[in-house]
Image (spheres, rainbow, N blue to C red):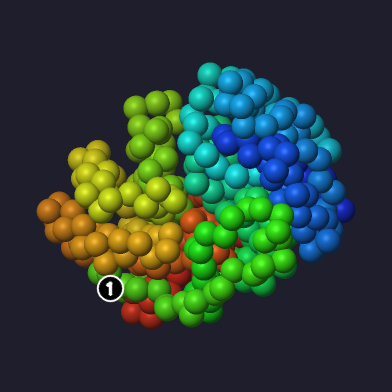
Amino acid sequence: MLIKPEKLNPGDRVATISPSWGGAGAPELRWRYEQGIDRLKTVFGLQVVAMPNSLKGPDYLYRHPEARAKDLMDAFQDPSIKAVIANIGGDDSIRLLPYIDFQVIRDNPKIVMGYSDVTIVHLLCHKAGLSSFYGPAILTDFAENIEMDSYTIEMIKRTLFNTEPIGEIEPARKWTSERLEWVEENKHKQRPLRNNSSYELLQGEGRAQGRLIGGCIDVLEFAKQTVLWPEEEHWEGGILFFETSEEKPEPDFIKYWLRNYAAQGILSKINGMVFGKPMDETHYDEYKSVISQVLEEYGETDLPVLLNLNFGHTEPKFILPYGAKAEIDCDHTTFSILESGVK
């Protein structure tokens, strides 16, 4: 069992970090960061501190992974900080690994949230025995133009501010992945939202329950054969969640990667899988096809698989707490998180 961190309350102090790309500190994007942290303050009543290295810009942070890691470690060691939220993802959080003290994380459990390349930070927490949260980031969801999406706000409150079971996660009514340049003249321009379709059952019957484990499938490749790769017990009976990055990987890559999970024995150990809506719904049908192909190749045609969930590289999004018990109901095409994410 992973350690659950304590819930957030209005007035709590939260830290922002840049574990990968340092765009939050770029002068031309500073307005975007300020817009994001303003929402933490006004929507959720939180106090915000930027960790010292987090706003030093992309060049500095690329050259100094140890500075990025120090921010993370210092945030854990500061008892006044109740949560750590990533500014954005990137592509090289894996370079933090040599500078991480897992005991510090374990001894100072607190909320950690982000998505995409922040998958690596989640695996750092997982290795230390801490449940973290695959969810919104400062420069994307919090800094959404005009206002945050109400679906995202509700999911943050249900998951991080509440000790009741999170419950059924209904699909968002609307969604967008549209790219709108992060320039200040677009600050008051809202991205158009499209009608969302419901979750799609790819295969399976009845109900499947298990503890959540997964992340961005592209980024999980960076962690294979490192100390971060979860031990066998964490896959056993789990609900595996995957989503794809803004790179929109070709369907063949999904096929190759899933074959590796099958070859490791992971697909035969888990109780179910859920997939996030791909960015712009690119390759949606092709992904379905290769997922089905691999499951058929390995005799896993009864494994419950649910598609088109609102997490990852799509907005709005809900939050997945690592290690929390979740349920796929194939008969009603629903997804629920059966316990709280926090204590």
The three-letter amino acid code for the residue at tag 1 is: Glu
Local packing at callout 1 (Cα closer than 10 Å; few below 14, some 14-19, many 20+) is some
The residue nearer to you, when weighing 181 against 9, is 181
89 horizontally vs 143: left or right: left
- Mark yes or no: residue 84 visible: no
> Is 173 displayed left or right of 278 in the figure?
right
Q: Give the image location of residue 287, x and y in percent.
A: 27, 60
Q: Which residue is mark 1?
A: 205
Locate residue 170, reporting x and y percent: 52, 75
On screen, 67 above or below 241?
Answer: above
Q: How many marks?
A: 1
**Is 266 left, or right, of 65 in this rendering?**
left
Return the x and y of residue 105 as percentages of the image width and height: 64, 31
Q: Residue at x 65, y 44 (%)?
A: 87
Q: Is residue 28 left or right of residue 296?
A: right
Q: Is residue 249 visible?
A: yes
Nearest the eye: 329 or 139: 139
Q: Residue furthest right?
A: 11
Label 1: which secondary element: loop
Nearest the eye: 100 or 145: 145
Residue 199 drawn above or below residue 216? below
Image spot of residue 184 (x, y percent) = 71, 55
x 67%, y 67%: residue: 189
Could you say which quadrant of the image residue 222 lies in? Answer: top left
Between 147 and 69, the one lying in front of the other is 147
In the picture, residue 102 is in which quadrant? top right
Looking at the image, is 141 positioned above or below residue 16? Answer: below
Q: Residue at x 21, y 57 (%)?
A: 290
